[in-house]
Image (cartoon, rainbow, N blue to C red):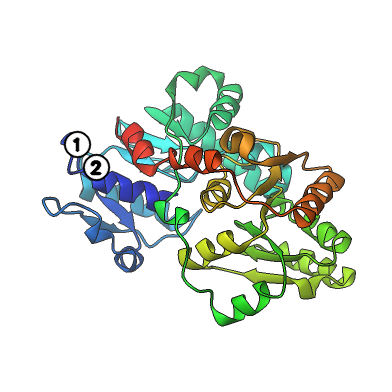
């Protein structure tokens, strides 16, 4: 999300003279992404090295010197660990969702307590708070109603490349996917993603396989241990960090996207799958019905039987997304999100 939005903002430098853009991040990684070529030839794109990970105390100490280098800037923080002190007089914070506060399975009790206080701090001091969905806007307004006037919707988009076919899959991945129909899950493997439901689907539908693509979290070992006990682990393929090209090809060849999350601020895998023409089976919570509209099959995240029934229907009657759904998603662009953020 942050990468796509930053790239769209860089492109706007050619048409919007009201602002310049400086990127902070690990410079080696930014260079590997080719960020210096994002800006039009008439503009430079200064980079400030920011080598810190999420929830870093060192980042808090480094913040004042980084701010001094960037001088007068309107800051955008796409994570809840915004600077706790030495804040500028005007800055923008994106709050993607309230999972840390509202979805107990998303994190530990201690981190939930910290996140709640950090979100309160950000809301109290920000000049504006941007959100990716109306669902997050409603959650924030209910959480801190005294600051609801600061909330601004910017939305998210889908990269145009997801409407195109991807490159050939690596041999090891292709060998798995070519063995039969598979469902696809994309995103980090944290407990609130509710992926254990997928094991029950595999158990009930023996001819179905499952590709899980995304960052691992400690709890995932428990899921795989259960998969082994159930005898379904050999029908699973887990990919830690697939490239965008691999993801595009997986979306295009999957029978459906399986996304049973208990809480989402937007749900990028939904729009990426729909762009590729892939059916979606997902939860009916948070932003997902807002984002997917009539282009997905929704299930209560606590109703395993509903997910099994939806999966069985797609196994028995395979289909692709209707053109109207693909056209709807095509209108969700990062350029539109960047324009709203710039304003």
* Residue wearing tag 1: 16
The residue shown at (83%, 51%) is 308
Numbered tag placed on residue 12 in the rendering = 2
The answer to whether residue 287 is visible is no
Nearer the observer, 57 or 141 = 141
Residue 131 position within the rendered picture, expressed as x and y whole percent measured from the top left: 48, 34
Residue 228 position within the rendered picture, expressed as x and y whole percent measured from the top left: 84, 73
Say which quarter of the image contains residue 99: top right
For the image, the number of numbered tags is 2
253 vs 340, left or right, is: right
Local SS, label 2: helix
Nearer the observer, 280 or 77 = 280
Q: CA distance from mark 2 to mark 1?
A: 6 Å
Nearer the observer, 235 or 74 = 235
Residue 55 position within the rendered picture, expressed as x and y whole percent measured from the top left: 51, 53
Asked if 21 appears above or below 176 in the picture, the reply is above
Q: Residues within 10 Å of mark 2 (few under 14, many from 20)?
A: many
Asked if 273 appears above or below 325 in the picture, the reply is below
Asked if 220 appears above or below 162 in the picture, the reply is below
Q: Are marks 2 and 1 in contact (CB under 8 Å)?
A: yes
Residue 176 position within the rendered picture, expressed as x and y whole percent measured from the top left: 67, 76
The residue shown at (87%, 72%) is 231
The residue shown at (18%, 39%) is 15
Q: Residue furthest left?
A: 42
The C terminus: image quadrant: top left
Say which quarter of the image contains residue 226: bottom right
The residue shown at (23%, 60%) is 36
Local SS, label 1: loop
The answer to whether residue 307 is visible is yes
């Amino acid at each position: 999300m942050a990468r796509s939005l930053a790239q769209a903002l860089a492109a706007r430098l050619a048409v919007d003279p009201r602002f310049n853009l400086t990127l902070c991040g690990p410079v080696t990684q930014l260079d590997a992404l080719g960020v210096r070529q994002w800006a039009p030839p008439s503009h430079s794109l200064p980079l400030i090295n920011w080598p810190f990970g999420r929830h870093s105390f060192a980042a808090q100490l480094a913040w004042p010197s980084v701010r001094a280098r960037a001088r007068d800037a309107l800051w955008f923080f796409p994570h809840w660990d915004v600077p706790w002190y030495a804040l500028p007089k005007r800055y923008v914070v994106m709050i993607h969702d309230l999972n840390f506060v509202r979805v107990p399975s998303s994190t530990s009790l201690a981190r939930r307590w910290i996140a709640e206080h950090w979100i309160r701090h950000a809301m109290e001091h920000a000049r504006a708070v941007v959100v990716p969905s109306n669902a997050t806007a409603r959650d924030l307004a209910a959480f801190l109603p005294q600051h609801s006037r600061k909330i601004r919707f910017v939305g998210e988009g889908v990269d145009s490349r997801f409407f195109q076919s991807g490159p050939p899959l690596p041999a090891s991945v292709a060998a798995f996917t070519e063995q039969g129909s598979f469902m696809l899950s994309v995103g980090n493997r944290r407990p609130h993603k509710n992926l254990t439901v997928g094991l029950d689907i595999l158990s009930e539908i023996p001819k179905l396989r499952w590709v899980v693509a995304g960052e691992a979290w400690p709890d995932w070992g428990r899921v795989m241990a259960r998969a082994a006990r159930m005898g379904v682990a050999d029908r699973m393929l887990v990919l830690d960090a697939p490239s965008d090209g691999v993801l595009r090809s997986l979306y295009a060849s999957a029978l459906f996207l399986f996304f049973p999350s208990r809480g989402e601020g937007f749900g990028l895998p939904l729009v990426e799958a729909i762009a590729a023409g892939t059916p979606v089976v997902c939860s009916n919570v948070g932003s997902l019905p807002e984002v997917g509209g009539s282009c997905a099959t929704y299930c209560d995240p606590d109703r395993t039987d509903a997910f099994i029934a939806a999966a069985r229907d797609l196994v028995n009657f395979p289909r692709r997304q209707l053109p109207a759904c693909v056209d709807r998603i095509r209108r969700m662009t990062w350029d539109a999100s960047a324009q709203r953020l710039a304003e």
